[in-house]
């Protein structure tokens, strides 16, 4: 049809109207051939053979019945689709239809249906096929070791956990720069640290330490290879451990503001409570060191000390406020 | 004097006569510029409705805004996901493969080409018309596979289905 219209245009003479309105179904956008091509099933016309006689084209062989007609019901489907393959209408004996129906019609059938080819199909992953895969993989598998039944046992034997990601993508290249990142996690309680070492380690770690779970996380991505990042992470852990055990000279200058936990001894709260008690009842006994020591030894003062320490360390909550209230009442005999 | 004055009128008449016969002549007297409000019609990948004698396939009948609703995607790879790269390279490969197939199997393609990538493997699915004898088809398939795999340095598989004639979805 397109060729006919072009002929009528040209027959109008020397009018050179550019053929912009020409319907080009086989233009830049689409790569399917134009619809008007008539598939010649017979002889197009006998070419001139130069006197050798008429050329008889070999008669076109008719296509046979598709394989779907010859499939027994109990066939081995894993032989039809052994691996991932696009949809083949002649191999799938199902009356599938796919597509948006024309008005008053039904979805187009599976023969020549591009929509069925476009979608990924899982015809190669039937339960029978998966069972075969498992059977084939079994000889290469070993049992999970019995000493590592629970998570706690795994943590006990393997306290350091390393995490890295592998990336698979479609394309000729395997490399993905995000595959070099390594996460190293370890619980501080599984490391051999004394009190000073633990406090120093926590100060050195800063943000990498999570207080709630007592877990240290080191993330390394500065080197281009995963092996290098793993080595760097292990090196960092080693250095942190050894440094936290060392005591430097300048650590003696640690002030009260640097302390992690609140300690009641020599704090303003202790001074205050002792002053109040001295002024309250023991006015006659005078103010001396041994009086203070005796006061400190009293049970209600000890309770007061516990409640204040708890409030300062753990923060305010119902139970800690109640405890403080009880302690104060006892101290003041209310 | 009267003949002198008539000359320009005759000339104008002759000029307008000339303008009628050859529409490229543009030095007639009145030439106006007609402007309408611009009608921003979308013309991408659309075959306009006609008399009803133009057969179209399912792919051509549905417009691009139906992709994802009534049409699937002709090319599948992971590069368009979040955080993945290589989208531009895959697209350029796709365009080249479509042109290559269109030229190699000239006149035989019944519908668009579907390209699927599974890891390293490039899977080109095409539906063809039975225009060539099977031997020629086999040769062209082998030629395409080996040439493209050498070109792209990855295994290329061609999955061809053949039909007698194109499947017509409707007539526009």
Image (spheres, coloured by chain):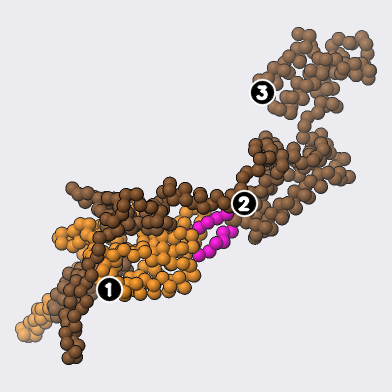
User: Horizontally, is B88 left or right of A283 in the view?
Assistant: left
Q: Which region is colored magenta?
A: A164-177
Colour of the chain lettered B: orange
Name the residue beneath numbered marker 3. Answer: A317
Q: Which mark is residue A164?
A: 2
Q: Quadrant of the N terminus of chain A?
A: bottom left
- Report the chain holding disc 3: A
Colour of the chain lettered A: brown
Residue B112: horizontal and vertical position, in percent?
32, 63
- Report the chain holding disc 2: A
- Can you say whether A58 is above or below B84 in the image? below
Q: Are marks 2 and 3 on the same chain?
A: yes
Name the residue beneath numbered marker 1. Answer: B133
- Give how far apart the Cα atoms at labels 2 and 3 are: 40 Å
Q: Main secondary structure of the magenta part?
A: loop
Please check the rendered image and state whether residue A171 is part of the magenta-colored stretch, yes or no. Answer: yes
Q: Of helix, strand and loop, which one carries label 2?
A: strand
**Residue extending furthest bottom?**
A51
Please check the rendered image and state whether residue B170 is part of the magenta-colored stretch, yes or no. Answer: no
């Amino acid at each position: 049809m397109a060729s006919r219209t072009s002929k009528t245009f040209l027959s109008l003479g020397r009018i050179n109207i550019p053929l912009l309105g020409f319907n080009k179904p086989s233009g830049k956008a689409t790569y399917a051939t134009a619809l008007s091509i008539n598939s010649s099933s017979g002889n197009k016309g006998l070419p001139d053979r130069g006197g050798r006689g008429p050329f008889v084209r070999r008669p076109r062989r008719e296509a046979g019945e598709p394989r779907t007609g010859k499939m027994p019901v109990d066939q081995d489907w894993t032989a039809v689709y052994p691996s991932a393959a696009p949809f083949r209408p002649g191999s799938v004996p199902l009356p599938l239809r796919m597509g948006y129906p024309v008005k008053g019609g039904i979805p187009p059938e599976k023969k020549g249906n591009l929509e069925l080819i476009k979608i990924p199909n899982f015809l190669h992953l039937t339960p029978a096929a998966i069972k075969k895969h498992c059977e084939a993989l079994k000889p290469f598998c070993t049992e999970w070791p019995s000493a590592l039944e629970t998570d706690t046992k795994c943590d006990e034997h393997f306290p350091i956990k390393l995490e890295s990601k592998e990336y698979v993508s479609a394309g000729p290249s395997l490399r993905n720069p995000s595959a070099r990142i390594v996460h190293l996690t370890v619980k501080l309680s599984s490391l051999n640290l004394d009190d000073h070492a633990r406090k120093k380690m926590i100060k050195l770690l800063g943000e990498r330490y999570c207080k709630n779970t007592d877990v240290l996380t080191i993330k390394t991505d500065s080197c281009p290879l995963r092996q290098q990042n793993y080595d760097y992470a292990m090196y960092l852990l080693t250095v942190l451990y050894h440094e936290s055990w060392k005591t430097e000279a300048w650590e003696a200058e640690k002030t009260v503001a640097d302390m992690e936990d609140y300690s009641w001894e020599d704090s303003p709260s202790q001074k205050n409570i002792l002053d109040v008690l001295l002024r309250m009842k023991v006015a006659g006994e005078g103010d001396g060191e041994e009086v203070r020591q005796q006061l400190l030894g009293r049970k209600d003062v000890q309770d007061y000390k516990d409640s204040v320490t708890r409030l300062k360390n753990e923060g305010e909550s119902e139970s800690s406020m109640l405890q403080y209230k009880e302690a104060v009442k006892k101290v003041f005999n209310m | 004097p009267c003949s002198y004055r008539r000359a320009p009128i005759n000339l104008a008449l002759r000029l307008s006569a000339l303008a009628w016969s050859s529409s490229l002549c543009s030095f007639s007297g009145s030439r106006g510029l007609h402007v309408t409000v611009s009608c921003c019609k979308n013309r991408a990948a659309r075959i306009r409705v006609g008399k009803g004698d133009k057969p179209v396939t399912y792919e051509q009948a549905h417009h691009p805004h139906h992709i994802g609703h009534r049409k699937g995607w002709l090319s599948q790879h992971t590069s368009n996901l979040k955080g993945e790269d290589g989208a531009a390279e895959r697209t350029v490969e796709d365009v080249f493969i479509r042109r290559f197939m269109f030229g190699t199997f000239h006149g035989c393609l019944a519908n668009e080409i579907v390209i699927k990538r599974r890891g390293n493997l490039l899977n080109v699915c095409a539906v063809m018309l039975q225009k060539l004898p099977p031997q020629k088809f086999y040769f062209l398939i082998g030629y395409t596979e080996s040439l493209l795999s050498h070109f792209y340095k990855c295994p290329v598989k061609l999955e061809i289905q053949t039909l007698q004639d194109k499947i017509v979805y409707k007539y526009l």
